[in-house]
Structures are given as C-alpha cells and as structure tokens.
C-alpha cells in the first residue's frame, strides 16, 4: 500500500515537472533515469551503478545542447565571427548557465539522491543541477526526437542569447591579456587540493602572477575552478 502511495505522489510530482518543461513524456522511464543521481542507486557498484544513474544521459544531452545552441547562435548573429560565437556558446552551456536553467525548470525537488547527498545540499549544488539539465534534455530527445529537444532548449535558452554576459570574454583569456599588457608572464594555475567523492569532486585551484598574491577558487572541475580563480584575480586587481 505504501509503495502505491509513493508511486502516486511521484507521478503527481512528475506531472508538475512535465508542465514546467513543456513536454509530456510518452515513456517516463527516461525522465526518472534523468533525475537519478548515482548516490541514489542501490544494489550496484562501479560501472553498473553509473549506467543506472543519469550519467549516460548527461553525456548525450551535453552534445545535443551544444548542437542546438550552436545553431541558435549561428542564426541569431549572422555577422559574428567564429571566436565570438565560440565565446557565446561557452557562456550559454557552462555549468553556471545550466544550473540557472535547472532552477528555472524547478528540477531540484524532483532529484533522486542518496540520503547523504540530500543532507549535504545536493539539490542546490550547481554541478549536479547542471548535469541533470543535460540529462533531462537527452531524455526528451530519446522520448520524442530532436524537434522536441530543440523546443525545450528554445524555451529555456532563447532569452539568454542576447543577455549582456553572453559575449563576455573567458576570464582566463581576460587575465592573460591583462598580464601581457603589463609585460608579465602568463598566469600559472596550480592544483591546491582535490576533495569529495569520485562522482562529485571539488577542485581548489590557485592562480599565480609574479608580483601579486595568489588567488584561490573552487569548482566541480579544474577548468571551472581556473575560470573562477581568474575572475576573482581580475576583480582584485582592477578598479
């Protein structure tokens, strides 16, 4: 009886999520898998656990998202050169942007997390939210095809194409140009610490420029941590 009640409550929650996404699934198994973090998988370890979580869907969704947003940018900015389009794409599909979309979709309450991950704030963790957005997009793609996935991206990314930050330079590029303009060596990034489990690591990176105090930052990947450190360094040294 309890299992039946839980299933009814689950279905009611997914009804609301489908309304927010703008897509009704023909097969909700795709959506349920997209919402399942590896910490919620029981009775399996290693690769068997990973394939029962959203990780494979995340891989697919990352590429589907990149293609759709690239096409949107190509059409929206007919005079833009490759470099500008690449920067805009990076800004629109980065962890921060995808996590913001996840919040707009209301994905957090629907995530399936292990008890420990849930207690530690996994529903609000940007790295998890960003991964789940890509997994949900892949679920839509598998459920109804490319046009359905494209419609969802249009729904949640279209307004972001022309936001002021969309064409901003990568912080690492900006910091390198800042250093070169002052005759300084290129910034050096070094790993200070790696912590957390394999499925959800955290990296602490320091950026060094001769003559200045190092600046440290954390991120779910080395690249994200480097970008955050570069942005923090620039904020410290520029008016």
Image (cartoon, grey):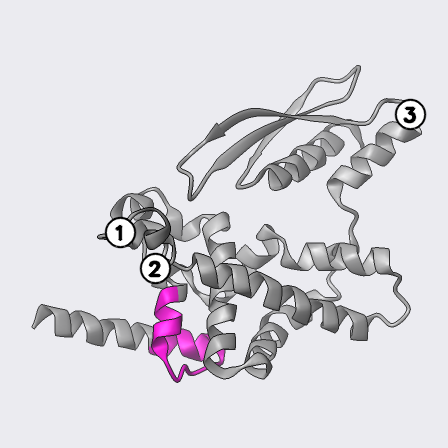
Q: Quadrant of the C terminus?
A: top right
Residue at the spot 64% in from the left edge and 58% down from the top edge: 93
Structural crowding at the residue carrying mark 2, measured as other residues with C-alpha within 10 Å and reported as few (<14), some (14–19) or many (≥20):
some
Q: Quadrant of the N terminus?
A: bottom left
Contact (Cβ within 8 Å) of mark 1 with mark 2: yes
Q: Dot 2 lies on which element?
A: loop
Residue at the spot 80% in from the left edge and 61% down from the top edge: 85
Mark 1 / mark 3, whichever is N-terminal: 1
- Residue 34 occupies which quadrant of the picture? bottom left
On the image, the x and y values in percent for residue 52 come to: 34, 59
Q: Is residue 103 visible?
A: no
Q: Dot 1 lies on which element?
A: loop
- The magenta-colored residue range is 15-33
Q: Residue furthest top?
A: 211
On the image, the x and y values in percent for residue 50 come to: 38, 53
Residue under numbered circle 1: 44
Q: Is residue 188 left or right of residue 118?
A: right
Residue under numbered circle 2: 52
- Against 206, residue 228 (above or below) is below
- Against 38, residue 196 (above or below) is above
- CA–CA distance in space, label 1 to label 3: 55 Å
Residue at the spot 60% in from the left edge and 72% down from the top edge: 153
Q: Is residue 105 left or right of residue 28?
A: right
Structural crowding at the residue carrying mark 3, measured as other residues with C-alpha within 10 Å and reported as few (<14), some (14–19) or many (≥20):
few
- CA–CA distance in space, label 1 to label 2: 9 Å
């Amino acid at each position: 009886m309890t299992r039946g009640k839980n299933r009814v409550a689950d279905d009611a929650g997914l009804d609301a999520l489908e309304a927010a996404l703008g897509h009704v699934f023909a097969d909700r198994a795709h959506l349920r898998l997209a919402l399942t973090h590896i910490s919620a998988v029981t009775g399996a370890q290693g690769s068997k656990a990973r394939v029962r979580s959203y990780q494979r869907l995340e891989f697919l969704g990352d590429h589907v998202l990149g293609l759709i947003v690239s096409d949107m940018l190509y059409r929206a900015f007919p005079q833009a050169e490759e470099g500008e389009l690449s920067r805009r794409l990076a800004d629109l599909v980065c962890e921060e942007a995808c996590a913001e979309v996840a919040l707009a979709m209301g994905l957090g309450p629907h995530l399936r997390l292990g008890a420990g991950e849930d207690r530690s704030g996994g529903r609000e963790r940007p790295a998890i939210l960003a991964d789940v957005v890509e997994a949900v997009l892949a679920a839509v793609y598998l459920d109804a095809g490319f046009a359905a996935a494209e419609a969802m991206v249009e729904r949640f990314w279209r307004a972001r194409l022309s936001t002021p930050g969309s064409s901003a330079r990568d912080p690492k590029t900006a910091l390198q140009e800042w250093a070169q303009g002052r005759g300084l060596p290129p910034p050096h990034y070094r790993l200070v610490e790696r912590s957390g489990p394999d499925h959800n690591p955290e990296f602490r990176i320091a950026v060094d420029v001769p003559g200045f105090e190092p600046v440290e930052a954390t991120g779910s990947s080395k690249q994200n941590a480097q970008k955050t450190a570069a942005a923090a360094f620039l904020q410290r040294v520029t008016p």
